[in-house]
Image (cartoon, rainbow, N blue to C red):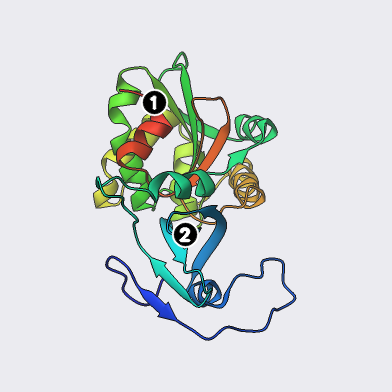
Amino acid sequence: MIKKPYVLAILLALPTQAPAAEAKNWPAPIKALEAEGVEVVGTFKAPGGLTGYAGLAGMQPLAIYLTGDGKHAIVGTMIDGKGNNLSEKPVADLVNKPMTDQVWKQLGQSTWVGDGKNTAPRIVYVFTDPNCPYCNKFWNDARPWVKAGKVQLRHVMVAILGPTSPGKAAAILAAKDPEAALTQHEQGHATGGIKPLSRIPQETAAQLETNQKLMQQLGSSATPTIFYKDAGGKVRKIQGAPSGGLLTEVLGPR
């Protein structure tokens, strides 16, 4: 996470540094942000002679603008004279990177818990830890789409956030009705959710391990990590609980 508070925009005035032998030789102000914990994922063209950078602060997308002299970076939202947000789309396009169809196939072959009708026209995969509050938020936010039969969420269960995560994830996967167990857990999330298993069956432990390895292979280290297909059929990936227009992008029209 960023260690310093950012409200709207920050101006960094830093001396230039000699080029270093690294894969991504960002300008000095961008490197400074990386040192603060920002993950810089790419660049885009921006108005006013600026260069735009898309970043992630934890799971929060971030727009960064480098001035023409390369010595200053502004963090925040760029708007035009009509108040239009000029940062949202280019940052989303870079952060929500297109993935390959092979990734979609791998997700389908993982151990997942269905949430919604099998006949739903839209499928969304989500790596879910039972102790993740943002996973619970996404589960709740998706209820209108799921209940309407428009979306089936497929929760690829992992256990990375706490000592009770393996037992809770195993309790869901090993239940007679995993979907009902997941629903019970998410509905009672605020009070601890499902009771964790004290002894995890070997098969279930192997499933959790395989899911976690897949998550790592796909370049994710936080939950929820969501995979969906956009309007053009491209597989996209985002981290964190989407809201507003991005929630509609993931789940489709209501």
Give the residue furthest to the top. 119
Task: Say whether residue 194 is visible.
Answer: no
Residue under circle 1?
Answer: 252
Callout 1 crowding tier (Cα within 10 Å): few <14, some 14–19, many ≥20: some
Residue 236 visible, this orientation: yes
Q: Nearer the viewer, residue 238 or 68?
A: 68
Is residue 190 shown left or right of residue 2? left
Among all residues in the image, which is located at the extreme bottom? 15
Locate residue 116, reporting x and y percent.
40, 23
Q: Is 185 above or below relative to 118? A: below
Residue 35: mark:
none
Residue extending furthest toward the right:
21
Alpha carbon distance from label 1 to label 2: 24 Å
Q: Earlier in the sequence, mark 1 or mark 2?
A: 2
Q: Quadrant of the C terminus?
A: top left
Closest to the observer: 30 or 172? Answer: 30
Residue 161 x, y percent position in the rendering: 46, 59
What label sits on residue 56 in the rendered view?
2
Residue under the point 26% across and 43% down: 188
